[in-house]
Structure formats: structure tokens, C-alpha cells
Image: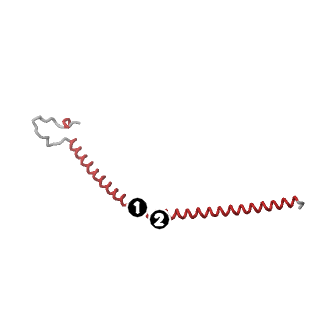
Amino acid sequence: MSSSASRPHQSSTSAGPSPEKSYFEQQRDALVGEIAVSLEHVLQNMNKLNRSLEGVIAVGNEFGSVEALWSQFENVMAKDLEAESEAKEGEQEEEADEVGEEAEVEGDITMRAEENGG
């Protein structure tokens, strides 16, 4: 886009630009000004958003120590629950073994009695 196409012919003896702008240049300058104002508003809003996000992050960071404490508590409780469940499983297996042994002994006694004619 050359600017000479939009301007009326000027004589080569003219030292400075013509004081009047064409309609296109006036509209272009107006639009460029609006764009500059809009970009300034966008920049201001982005700065506000950035400050808000920094505030949210700061509040979140304040809960870091509380979160660590609860995580530690949860881990301790999980270990205790695992130990209790393992102990219960061990007791149930022992009881099952005892019941199985008793049944085995009773079965042997019954078989011997039947063999002896009982």
C-alpha cells in the first residue's frame, strides 16, 4: 500500500506533507486510536486478573502446612487400619485352623468308632 495512491497529486516542489488528510487516513487514525485504547483496557484487565490470581495462590499457599499435617495424619491412620486388619485376618486364620483341626480330630474319632463296630 503506497500512500501516494491515496493522496492527490502533489508537486515535487512541495517541501512538507499536505495539511489535509484523506478520508481513509482519518478513518485509519481513528481506528488506530480506538485499538490503542482497547489494548490499554485489555492490559489493565490482565493486570487485575494477575493480581487476583496471585492473591488466590497466596491464600492456597497458606494452607500448605495444614494440608501436610492432614496428609501425615491420614498416612498414620492408614497404617493403623492396615495393622488392625492384618491382625484380624491372622486371628481369623488361626480360628479357622483350630476349627479345622477339631473337625479333623472328631472325624478321626468317628471313623475309628465305626471301624471298631461302634
Quadrant for the C terminus in the image = bottom right
- Spot occupied by residue 29 in the image (x, y as percentages of width and height): 22, 45
Neighbor class of circle 2 (other Cα within 10 Å; few <14, some 14-19, many 20+) is: few
Query: Which residue is nearer to you in this view: 32 or 6?
Result: 32
User: Does 73 sit above or below residue 46?
Assistant: below
- Spot occupied by residue 94 in the image (x, y as percentages of width and height): 69, 62
What residue sits right under mark 2 in the picture? 69
- Please give the label number shown on residue 36: none
Task: Choose top left, top right, bottom left or bottom right for residue 91.
Answer: bottom right
Which residue is at a point 10% across and 37% down the rendered structure image?
A: 14
Quadrant for the N terminus in the image = top left
Which residue is at a point 38% across and 61% down the rendered structure image?
A: 58
Which amino acid is tagged 1?
Asn
Query: Which residue is nearer to you in this view: 45 or 107?
Result: 107
Task: Give the left or right position of residue 67, taking residue 94 as reference.
Answer: left
Which residue is at a point 68% across and 61% down the rendered structure image?
A: 93
Which amino acid is tagged 2?
Leu
Precedes in sequence: disc 1 or disc 2 = 1
Query: Which residue is nearer to you in this view: 113 or 40?
Result: 113
Task: Choose top left, top right, bottom left or bottom right for residue 19.
Answer: top left
Does dot 1 land on a helix, a strand or a loop? helix
- Spot occupied by residue 45 in the image (x, y as percentages of width and height): 32, 55
What residue sits right under mark 1 in the picture? 61
Q: CA distance from mark 1 to mark 2?
A: 14 Å
